């Protein structure tokens, strides 16, 4: 990755101009980096700079240290920015009944379930799986006719990978059978599982 803006001179505490530094003086430079999704997914950033100057005694150089000596590393350790992962998904399911005989929800009617899985966290999520559970009103298992089947995704997501802010949409279909009619209802739920790359 590359800096958004490369190091630029800000000021020297004893007033020297850019490129010159007096004994005991500190010169300050500013560089910027716009945190991108790859940085978040990686869990943070590591940054270090090497400075080289010339003097009457020859050329000297030094590599930056983060100034935190309590970690046991007192020389030239990189400056680290840790970005905590906050993986969150929101799963939503809706049902639409095709009332074939216009007699209310009844035998032979098709139920189309639409499942939306949205990444509401801050990190890309992979290996999305859906576990769908369909039962009658007595808690006895029923079987879907099809699905969950991937339909579409947004923000560059796919059926198995959710980008931050992205949503993957799936559908499943069930035709009401006599078992469901006898029990008085159809109960359907789905659990979505995904996680960041380790």
Image (cartoon, rainbow, N blue to C red):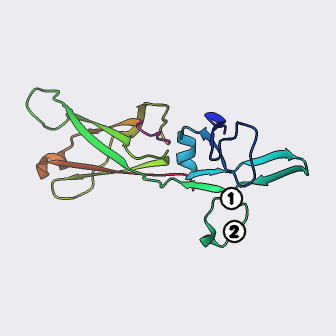
Q: Quadrant of residue 29?
A: top right
Please tell me which residue is depicted at 40% across the width and 37% down the height of the picture.
Answer: 165
Q: Which residue is mark 1?
A: 65
For residue 181, side relative to residue 117 (left or right): left
Q: Are marks 1 and 2 in contact (CB under 8 Å)?
A: yes
- The residue pinned by badge 2 equals 74
Give the residue drawn at x 45%, y 31%: 155
Of the two numbered discs 1 and 2 on the same chain, state the one appearing first in sequence: 1
Q: Nearer the viewer, residue 145 or 118?
A: 118
**Callout 1: SS:** loop
Stretch of the chain drawn in magenta: 161-166
Q: Quadrant of the N terminus?
A: top right
Q: Position of residue 164 (x, y in %)?
A: 44, 40
| Residue 80 pos. (x, y %) | 60, 56
User: Where is residue 105 shown, x and y percent of the image?
Assistant: 12, 36
The C terminus sits in image quarter: bottom right
Q: Nearer the viewer, residue 83 or 196?
A: 83
Gap between marks 1 and 2, in whole Å?
A: 8 Å
Picture mark count: 2
Q: Residue at x 63, y 69 (%)?
A: 69
């Amino acid at each position: 990755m590359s800096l958004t803006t490369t190091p630029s001179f800000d000021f020297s505490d004893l007033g020297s101009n850019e490129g010159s530094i007096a004994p005991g003086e500190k010169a300050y430079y500013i560089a910027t980096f716009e945190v991108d999704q790859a940085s978040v997914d990686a869990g943070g950033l590591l940054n270090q700079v090497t400075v080289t100057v010339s003097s009457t005694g020859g050329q000297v150089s030094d590599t930056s240290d983060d100034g935190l000596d309590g970690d046991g590393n007192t020389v030239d350790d990189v400056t680290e920015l840790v970005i905590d992962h906050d993986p969150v998904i929101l799963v939503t399911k809706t049902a639409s009944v095709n009332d074939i005989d216009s007699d209310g929800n009844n035998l032979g009617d098709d139920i189309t379930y639409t499942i939306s899985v949205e990444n509401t966290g801050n990190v890309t999520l992979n290996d999305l799986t859906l576990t769908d559970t369909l039962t009658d009103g007595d808690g006895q298992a029923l079987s879907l006719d099809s699905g969950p089947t991937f339909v579409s995704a947004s923000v560059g997501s796919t059926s198995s990978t959710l980008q931050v802010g992205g949503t993957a949409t799936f559908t499943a279909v069930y035709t009401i059978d006599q078992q469901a009619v006898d029990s008085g209802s159809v109960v359907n739920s789905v659990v979505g599982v995904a996680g960041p790359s380790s």
